[in-house]
Every structure is written in C-alpha cells, then in structure tokens.
Image: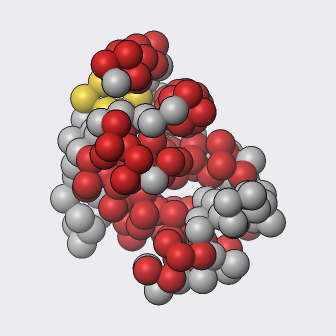
C-alpha cells in the first residue's frame, strides 16, 4: 500500500500539481474542496470541446462547482469526447457514467446533457468525499470503496488513469 501511495504522489509531483482547486465555484454552488490542481496556469483559451457540447460542459461544471478543465480532461480520457462511447462495465457516454450512478443522481446517462451533468456531480461527490483531486479521480475510475480500502489508487490501471487525467487537466487549465 505504501508503494502505491508513493507512486501516486510521484505521479502527482511529475504532473506539476500544487495544492488548491483550480477554477472557482459559483456563488450558489458547493464550497471548494482542497484538492491538488495543475500548477500550470495558462491564459484563458477555448476548451477543446466540440461546439455542440460546449454549453453542456460549462453548465455542468458550474452546477457541480468543478473546474471546467478538469471535467473536460475526464471526458477526454474516459471517452475521447464521444457521446456514444460505452465500456465493458456498462458505463456510457462522454463521462462514462454507470446507469446506477446516474439513477442515484436522478439523471439519464443516455442523454448527453444529463450524462455530463451526472459525471460532474459524481466528480464533485468524490472531491467532497476524498478532499483530494488524485483520490477523487481514482474513485471516479475504480470506485470509492476500492480507493478507501487501499487509501490510494487500487491498481496500476487506476494509477495510469489518474496520471492521464491530471496531465490532460494541466494542459487545459485556464480554458473556458
């Protein structure tokens, strides 16, 4: 377990992370949670989101109080921004939301707008639960129970997932 924690910390350090949650939360949204965020701050630039999804991602990020760049990074790693993506585990859509997770949030994972909103809200839940972007991303990928049991990413696949999302997030930080 210590080795996995060390690997996760090294991945975070290699990704140029720093303490603090990138981007603000809306006045009506949840309070920010201390989390590691990419240290690289770029001037505002458009997020590389297909135009037809741009408002959906912005609305979901604002609703859930998560950084837009983080949400887009998760979608890029999860589905390559393909709304028709599906996994062998049954996850679906841009944010690869499981139907059971979407149902708990009273959303439909097969409707693009609701899929992105469900992913954003679930990511917010993981940030609130773990108070760490790395652990929240690990839980988004492997499930919160597995992360709680290990105290870290539970397997090499999840360690790589966290590194990939963090790298993409760092590249996108500051996009709007």
- Residue toward you, 98 or 60: 98
Question: Residue, x 33% and y 61% (percent of image)?
Answer: 125
Q: Quadrant of the N terminus?
A: top left
Q: Would residue 8 be seen by someone viewing this image from the given angle?
A: yes
Q: Where is residue 78 shown, x and y percent of the image?
A: 65, 49
- 12 shown above or below 51: above
Left/right placement of residue 155 relative to residue 136 reads right
- Residue toward you, 53 or 165: 165
- Residue toward you, 48 or 141: 141
Question: Residue, x 23% and y 45% (percent of image)?
Answer: 131
Question: Residue, x 31% and y 51% (percent of image)?
Answer: 127
Q: Quadrant of residue 36?
A: top left
Question: Residue, x 45% and y 13% (percent of image)?
Answer: 14
Q: Would residue 68 be seen by someone viewing this image from the given angle?
A: no
Q: Where is residue 65 shown, x and y percent of the image?
A: 34, 60
Left/right placement of residue 62 relative to residue 142 reads left
Q: Where is residue 173 shown, x and y percent of the image?
A: 48, 36
Q: Which color scheme is applied?
A: secondary structure
Q: Quadrant of residue 151?
A: top left
Q: Where is residue 121 shown, x and y percent of the image?
A: 41, 67
> Across the whole image, how many numbered discs are drawn on residues?
0
- 151 shown above or below 23: above
């Amino acid at each position: 377990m210590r080795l996995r924690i060390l690997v996760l910390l090294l991945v975070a350090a290699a990704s140029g992370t720093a303490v603090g949650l990138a981007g603000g939360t809306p006045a009506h949204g949840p309070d920010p949670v201390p989390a590691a965020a990419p240290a690289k701050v770029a001037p505002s630039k458009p997020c590389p989101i297909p135009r037809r999804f741009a408002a959906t991602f912005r609305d979901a990020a604002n609703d859930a109080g998560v950084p837009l760049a983080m949400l887009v990074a998760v979608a890029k790693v999860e589905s390559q921004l393909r709304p028709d993506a599906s996994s062998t585990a049954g996850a679906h859509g841009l944010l690869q939301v499981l139907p059971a997770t979407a149902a708990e949030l009273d959303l439909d994972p097969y409707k693009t707008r609701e899929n992105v909103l469900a992913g954003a809200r679930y990511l917010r839940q993981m940030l609130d639960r773990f108070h760490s972007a790395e652990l929240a991303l690990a839980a988004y990928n492997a499930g919160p129970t597995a992360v709680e049991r290990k105290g870290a990413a539970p397997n090499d696949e999840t360690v790589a997932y966290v590194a990939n999302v963090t790298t993409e997030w760092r590249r996108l930080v500051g996009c709007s």
